[in-house]
Amino acid sequence: MGAQILQVIVNGVLLSLLYVLLSSGLTMIYGVMRILNWAHGSLVMLGAFLVYFVFAKHDINYVAGLIVAIIGMAALGVIVERLIFKPKRNAVLTAFIMSMGVLYILEVVAEVAFGTQSRFVPPIIPGFIKVGGVLMGSNRLILIPIALALALAYWAFLERTKWGRAIRATSQNKIGAGLAGVNIEWMAVLAMATGCGLAGAAGALMAPTIGITPFIDTSLSWKAFIIVFIGGRLSLIGTVLGAFLVGFTESIVTAYWGPEWVIMMEMAILALVLFFRPGGLLGVEVKED
């Protein structure tokens, strides 16, 4: 019993940190561009495939694969923003429908490039580590500090840099930020690059723990949307709370009831949150353009 509880806690922490990276980028993109990007899960999926290509297939260092996934998805995000989303900023429904098309395009690209069979990334560190008298997989334990470091780096970027503060100001009041001298056009590019880079990082960290196929993108997009709407769409702290709520729910439900119950429980939590707090856990009033 003690071993199972410890495993649930470790899995819950890891999943929560991965979901912070997964969903924070979506929150940022919506805040700056008012776009609900359904293709966000495809960027996570492609980030995982890039790690597979660099680390598993060509036996290059995992960190190199992580960097390639972050930079590659940030660059892809900018391309998508320039070509597809730029003309539809603030047209939430139209942009959402267009993002569905982007998801299926990227899914087909992944099918052509990597096939439809599951691909597996070997553990970063194979073997086990004894924690509290219980043997735990080294792979999952090493992923936790990496995910935490990336989440803290993202927080430091938003809180400690001029660009990060400008992104937050644009998210809260685009007109006011523009009057204060913030380049709104540049903020849209930066938000898309950062948000999609976070998606790539999430995919890179998930890669050693799951079987990667082109078809995981829709479930990942669902996960990100559930978390963002639980948190309040525009609240980064709310997104973090939503990520931990979903992460620990998934860990507990999987361990004691089975994975088939996970999505139902997460949707039930989302329904309860929106029933009692339609704006999400930490929904904020934002001036719309």
Image: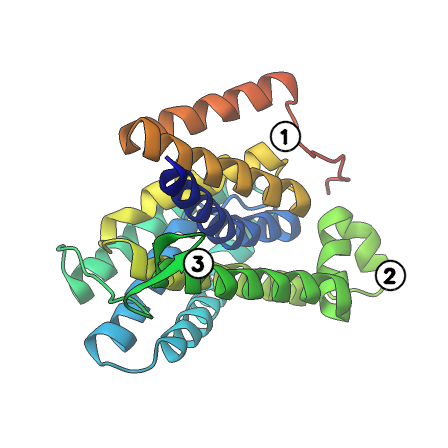
- Residue 26 point in image, percent of width and height: 53, 49
Identity, as a three-letter code, of the amino acid under mark 3: Ala
Q: How many marks?
A: 3
Camera-side residue: 53 or 92? Answer: 53
- The disc placed on residue 202 is 3
Q: Which element type, helix, strand or loop, lies under badge 1?
A: loop
Which residue is the extreme one toward the front? Answer: 133
Residue 199 visible in the current orientation? yes
Q: Residue at x 78, y 48 (%)?
A: 173
| Image height of 208 relative to 283, above or below | below
Residue at the location (24% across, 60% down)? Answer: 110
Q: What coloring was used for the rendering?
A: rainbow
Whichever of callouts 1 and 2 sits on the residue coming sooner in the sequence is: 2
Label 1 environment density (alpha carbons within 10 Å; few <14, some 14–19, many ≥20):
many
Q: Earlier in the sequence, mark 3 or mark 2?
A: 2
Give the residue at mark 2.
180
- Report which residue position mark 1 lands on: 280
Q: What separation in Å lies between label 3 and label 2 (alpha carbons)? A: 34 Å
Element under disc 3: helix
